């Protein structure tokens, strides 16, 4: 028999799969061209050409043992240096390889850092709505994720609520900037307020509170917005980064942790992250992919494509009467459901061929997430269906 | 502050690192040519040429999105089918893709299966000496690893001791065949005895006991030995496989779980393994590597090279008076230390430029592991030092 926890996860997951099976069934009934799948955040913009070119060059020219051998738990030293230098150029930092730990994507990095930091029963806070996997990542390391209720309609962190929720058991907070599912970008001002609360509570409680910033969408921002570099705002920040979105390499599982020298118990955290990579079974981030991103880390995929998708969809949907904060990052629109129950709303949308994710999966009721990382044709062809869906509620 | 568990792991790991720092220091004092490093199991035989060739073909010809996108948690369906068909050819099975879950190496696979099976406090048994990381893999999922004492001098499983150690909390046993660190291959007869014990106890206790067979060294066998295909011996067997050794791809992190349809709660286990890949942060086994091994899974690296290393080292060491069961698999010799304390013995060996791993790291006292996956020159040049080390004890 499988474990009780896993049984629950399997059932939860089966419900999600049912949604996709439903998608397949819908395609059969309505025809492929009448089904608009906005369900998953799988980038549909190809990786920059230099990525495959670099991989081929490495495979053709480097010594095979140097490509395929185990690497240090923390990653290949020259790769860690290359990433550090890239961050130094971009954010005027003074990192060395000792500040970078290569990870199996941001998901791997988050699991690693939770394993490093959490004792049984420690609490990690986050702001709803949030990426639902955080629950598992924290629980895997014996901790407990505590969500701070959604701050509607801005979906920015609420510093006051944060202050009320921190206890002596609070080991870390996770933020996701730009945010999945809302597409909102947290700006400098609100992050300063968050930092002030954390420092105040650290002093009051005599603890260290780490800010874990999950930033796979860092490069996906629009309207000239820049994502604040949080280690400059709060000294106890660890950044989990992934090339899944910026280089469209989600299947490759490659990312890194940035651990500034200012974080509490810096040396133990860095060393522990390498050890955690090993004991959690990642062993090392995939070696070939480490070598590739070292050379391609300053590039990014075609953000303008997502921007155009966003513009078309946002303008059309708001003109049909949907409520939605205009997202400035990631590739998600977070629209208010046209009835209280977001699952009922998402089910209703299926009748019109539209697949979205109900917001309750992100621990926030009454909304739906639209992942607009899809073909332009899909965006354009879906608009009449979104209009009919709105009309179905307003007739 | 990092967690208490991690603090202990970091200290343990620092001790191992000290050994490598020691190696560097030794090179400085004795000169590179006088240091013989048998410490780590990092293959030194290159991957078959077809591996890089296949990777390049994929990168040149396949659609970039198909190479780099997220895959199903359980892996790419066509890859799972290719692996199933390869196993069917080799072991006369009737697997389909539904029996295969692609994993981030065997280390990833073992963590996945522990997450699927273990409730808090469940016990997993193994036979000492064993790969020390099993402790962490079981503990990560809330279980407890219980080691059955070494069966000296054969290092085969002891079915009687196994029977005495199984309780109603025993969820699984892990075996590693061929074995790290001993190089011993468990044959059909002893495995039948193990299976009989497991069946008897399952019946007696009304439980299911899974046999997890960790087989990264399956292809590395000598003297015409074959490794029994354990699912044919015990119906409740799950095999964790890795291409780290057979294709010399340890840094690539690619392997798979074979979950025969005969295992208890088969569907839940397979489905759970895909979910576990996701929630543990592996998400999916690296996609490019999945595509590569689907085409190269019938190949293997140059086993004859390891065989020759083994012959030279085994013959020389036994002629100098070292005691050692002749290994028939993997790339390890497990020699009896020339004094009771294996750490003291390994330290003594350093004076002669020899780096080995003390057996206590494998939860067995009084031996040392020699990883002979090194250059032929290193093997040959090390022999006089091994002779002098023996003489130092017998003078």
Image (cartoon, coloured by chain):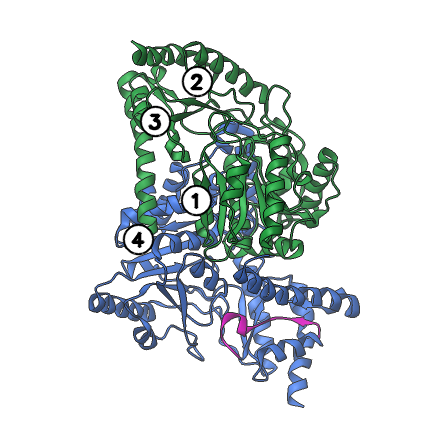
Chain colours: A green, B blue
Given contact means CB atoms under 8 Å apart, are the residues at marks 1 and 2 in contact?
Answer: no
Q: Which residue matches tag 3?
A: A342
Q: Is residue B209 visible?
A: yes
The answer to which of marks 1 and 2 sits earlier in the sequence is 1
Residue B376 point in image, percent of width and height? 64, 63
Mark 4 residue element: loop
Same chain, marks 1 and 2? Answer: yes
Which residue sits at x=63%, y=38%?
Answer: A292
Q: Nearer the viewer, residue A2 or B131?
A: A2
The answer to which of marks 2 and 3 sits earlier in the sequence is 2
Same chain, marks 2 and 3? Answer: yes
Q: Chain of mark 2?
A: A
Quarter of the rendering occupied by the C terminus of chain A = top left
Q: Which residue matches tag 2?
A: A323
Q: Chain of mark 3?
A: A
Q: Which residue matches tag 4?
A: A2
Given contact means CB atoms under 8 Å apart, are the residues at marks 4 and 1 in contact?
Answer: no
The answer to which of marks 2 and 4 sits earlier in the sequence is 4
The answer to which of marks 1 and 3 sits earlier in the sequence is 1
**How far apart are the two marked residues, 4 and 1, measured between alpha carbons?**
20 Å
Residue A360 picture quarter = top left
Q: Nearer the viewer, mark 1 or mark 2?
A: 2
Q: Nearer the viewer, mark 4 or mark 1?
A: 1
**How far apart are the two marked residues, 3 and 4, measured between alpha carbons?**
31 Å
Residue B169 point in image, percent of width and height? 31, 66
Q: Nearer the viewer, residue B2 or A18?
A: B2
Question: Range of the magenta residues?
Answer: B352-365
Residue A69 point in image, percent of width and height? 60, 52
Task: Work out whether A267 lies above or below B276.
Answer: below
Left or right? Give the position of A358 relative to A117: left
């Amino acid at each position: 028999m499988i474990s009780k926890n896993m049984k629950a996860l399997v059932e939860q997951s089966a419900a999600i799969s049912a949604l996709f099976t439903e998608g397949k069934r819908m395609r059969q009934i309505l025809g492929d061209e009448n089904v608009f799948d906005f369900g998953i955040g799988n980038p549909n913009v190809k990786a920059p050409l230099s990525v495959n070119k670099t991989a081929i060059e490495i495979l053709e020219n480097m010594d095979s043992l140097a490509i395929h051998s185990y690497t240090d738990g923390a990653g290949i030293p020259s790769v860690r240096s290359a990433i550090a230098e890239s961050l130094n150029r971009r954010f005027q930092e003074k990192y060395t390889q000792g500040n970078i730990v290569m990870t199996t994507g941001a998901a791997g990095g988050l699991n690693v850092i939770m394993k490093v930091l959490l004792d049984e029963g420690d609490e990690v806070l986050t702001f709803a709505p949030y990426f639902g996997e955080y629950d598992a990542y924290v629980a895997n390391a014996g901790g407990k994720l505590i969500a701070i209720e959604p701050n509607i309609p801005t979906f920015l962190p609420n510093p006051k609520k944060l202050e009320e929720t921190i206890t002596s058991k609070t080991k870390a907070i996770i933020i996701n900037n730009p945010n999945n599912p809302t597409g909102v970008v947290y700006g400098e001002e609100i992050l300063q307020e968050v930092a002030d609360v954390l420092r105040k509570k650290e002093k009051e409680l005599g603890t260290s509170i780490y800010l874990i910033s999950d930033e796979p969408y860092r490069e996906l921002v629009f309207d000239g917005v820049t994502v604040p570099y949080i280690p400059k705002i709060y000294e106890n920040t660890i950044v989990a980064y992934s090339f899944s979105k910026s280089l469209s390499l989600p299947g490759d599982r490659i990312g890194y942790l940035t651990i500034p020298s200012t974080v509490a118990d810096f040396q133990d955290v860095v060393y522990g992250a390498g050890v955690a990579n090993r004991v959690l079974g990642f062993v090392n981030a995939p070696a070939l992919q480490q070598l590739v991103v070292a050379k391609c880390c300053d590039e990014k995929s075609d953000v303008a494509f997502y921007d155009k998708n966003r513009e078309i969809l946002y303008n059309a949907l708001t003109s049909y009467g949907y409520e939605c904060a205009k997202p400035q990052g990631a590739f998600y629109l977070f629209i208010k459901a046209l009835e209280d129950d977001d699952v009922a709303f998402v089910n209703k949308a299926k009748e019109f061929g539209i697949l979205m994710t109900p917001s309750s999966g992100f621990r926030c009721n009454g909304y739906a997430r639209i992942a607009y990382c899809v073909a332009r044709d899909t965006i354009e062809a879906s608009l009449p269906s979104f209009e009919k869906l709105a009309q179905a509620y307003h007739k």
